[in-house]
Structures are given as structure tokens and as C-alpha cells.
Amino acid sequence: MSVISDASEDSGQDRRTGRRRPGYLAAAAVFAVGMLGTTLPTPLYGLYRQQLGFSELVVTVVFAAYAVGVIAALLIAGGFSDVLGRRPVLLAALGLSALSAVCFLTEGGLPLLYAGRVLSGFSAGLLSGTGTAAVLELAPKGRQARAGFAATAANMGGLGLGPLLSGILAEYAPQPLKLPFAVHLGLLAAAAAVVCVLPETVHRSDPRGSLRPQGMTVPPEVRGVFAPCALAAFAGFSMLGLFTAVAPAFLNQTLGERNLAVAGAVVFCVFCASTGGQLLMGRIGARRALPWGCAVLVAGLVLIALSLLLTSFPLLLAGALTGGAGQGMAFRAGLSEVSSAAPEAHQGATISAFFVVAYVGISLPVVGVGALTSALGLRDAGLVFAGCAVLLVAAVGARVSRTLSRASDR
């Protein structure tokens, strides 16, 4: 049987050296650095389009290659850290992120862009479940709520810092397509050093289990909670996918904003708002935050649609902040419910299954926008996406509200 060690002991002193070892905040920092690399290319796609001469559809397909990598890693290796331990899988994820950065540093055409994005997806897939589980398990007793916020904030915060960092470097420093990835390699080296001194939280008393691909592992006792929470994550991540893949092009082609640092800052604002929404969830509770998060997300999507109709940058920014807050509320609420219901021996695999559904949401709608752009133009394609997303999120919110109301009545 797999045994998770007592987090308060693991994040305290090392019994052999007497030195205090890093705890859940250090693990959260590692998580954030790994996720930072997955969004570094966001403000740079316009430069790649100029250099390589590809269409907006290709941009979204390159982005989708990342999501395919995430989903593949989650399905194949989602439960590996439950068997091997958190530290080896975290180190593997950081190594894959470094290989992705090398692909972008040596980029000479679309093949390396695709390879870099797939490797980045593999890294994010390993980090999503393993990083979250490590942060939660390293938290001392009584700080589980803080650890849950730290894990989701590290995820969203890292995703937001990527475009902010690369946008600033690309706009104001030399080598805009090289320097962001070189800086990230340095951050990854520091993160790997931290992982090497993190306490291991998975200890097994029986022979090591199988490393066969587990697919979507959702234990029976979690399934009633999993479905509505995963649907809410799908809806929220579809909006994040739009901003991460094509928001800089919206700013450039529709709103006339060509500053790459501004483009990166707008995407950063979405993820900052998501972190704020996650903090708000802690105040109102997961059961209430799920439907309320969907309602706020609908309001954000409406503002985004209006910004495209009226070509208004302030409305786009307001939509980003509102939609991000709604996504954050729903995402943290869903993750909290799922991780609380998951048995310890399958926590990493269950969280990975939750992220599979979320990353399907971040990929499919974005490719749809890219395909529509060829026929309708970027502005009209964005309006179609916003309309479809409003209908989807409203339906998910109604479903979540009914499901949780029935669960409360029992």
C-alpha cells in the first residue's frame, strides 16, 4: 500500500542533518517556474508569423500541440508520481521544460516549434498533478487551505508570468526570440536544485507498483463530485485558451496595439485575476464558488465580445479581469472538491484526470477559432467563440448548481 508521509514532519527538520528543509511554498515556487515556460511564446507568435510566414490557423495548431502534449502526459503518466514519488517526476518535468526551451533557442522552422510545444505540454502534464499533490502534501497540519491556494496560484501565476516576462524582454531587450528562453533555462536550473532538497512525500511499504499508462483514473468514490467540477474547469479553461493563443493577435489586428509588453501584460492580467478568484473562493466556499464562478465567467465573455464589437481596449481588459476571476473561482473550487474526495493512494492520478478535462477545454475551442479566422476574419471568429462560450458556460453553471443542490439536500 502507498503511504503518504506526514507533511508536518516532512516540511520540518531533516532527521539526519538537523537542518530545516523546504516546505510547500518552495514546492509551489518550483511549480510556478515550470508552468511559466508553457506560456513564454504567447506574445512571440506574431514575430514567428513574420519570420516563418504562417497563418493564424497555424498559430492555434501550434498552441494545440502543447495541449496534446499535456493530455498525453496526463493520460500516460498521470499516476506515476504515486508510484515513483513526487521528486523524480518533478525533476523529469523540469527536464522536459528545459528541452522545450532548447527547441525554441535553436528554432529554424515549424518542426522545432511543434516539438518545443509538445515537450512543453509533456512538462505541464507531469507538473499539473504532481506539483499540486506535492504542495498539498508538504503543508503542515492546519494549513491545507493555504496549500490549496498556493498550488492553484502557482499554476495560474506561473502561466501568467510567462507572457509578461517574454513580452517585456521581446519589446525592450535584444534577441526577442532567444532571450526569454535563455532566462527560463536559468530559472529551471534553480528550480531543479530546490527539488533535490524537497522532502519526498510518497513512501511505499509494498513492492513498487506498475508504471503502465492508467488513462483517466477516477476512483468510484470521487465520480459524483468529479463530473460537475471537471465541467466547470473545461468551461473556464476554454476562455484561458483563447487569451493565451490569440489575444496578442486580437490586440494587434483588431485593436491596433502592437507593443509586445502590453500584449504580455493583458494575458498576465487574466491569470492574475484567476488567482484573485481563487482567493475569493476560499472566503465563500467551494460549493457556492462553482456556480458563482461560472456566472462571473459569463459576464467576462460578454465584455470580451463587446470589446471586439466596439474595438475597445478598456472593455477587453475588463473582460479579461472579469473572466479570469470567474475562471479562478470555479477552478479552485473544483480542484478542492476533487482533491478532498480522492483517496490518498490515487490523489495524483485523480488530479491528473481533472486536468485532462481542463486541457481539452483549452485546446479544442482555440483550434476552432483559428479555423474560423480563415473564413470570417479574426474579429468575427472571436465573436463566434464568445457567443458559443457564453452558452457553454451558462449551461455548465446551471448543471453545477443543480448537481450540488441535490448533493446538499441528501
Image (cartoon, helix red, strand yellow):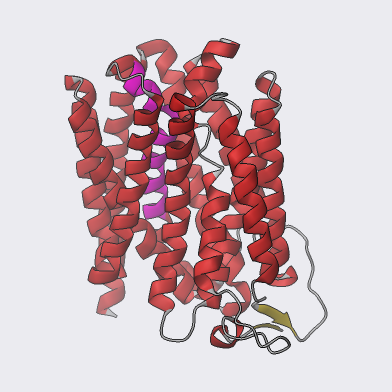
Picture coordinates of residue 140, whole percent (x, y) = 49, 83
Nearest the eye: 351 or 318: 318
Q: Is residue 247 magenta?
A: yes
Q: Is residue 368 visible?
A: no
Residue located 58% across and 31% down the image: 179
Instruction: Please say if 122 is above or below 206.
Output: above
Image mark count: 0
Picture coordinates of residue 228, whole percent (x, y) = 38, 60
In the figure, is residue 113 to the left or right of 42? right
Nearest the eye: 161 or 343: 161
In the figure, is residue 268 to the left or right of 341? left
Picture coordinates of residue 285, whole percent (x, y) = 27, 71
Q: Is residue 256 visible?
A: yes
Residue located 34% across and 49% down the image: 272
Residue located 48% across and 68% down the image: 223
| Res. 180 image quadrant | top right
Residue located 27% across and 51% down the image: 326
The quadrant in which the C terminus is found is: bottom left
Q: Which residues are magenta?
A: 231-252
The quadrant in which the N terminus is found is: bottom right
In the figure, is residue 83 to the left or right of 167? right
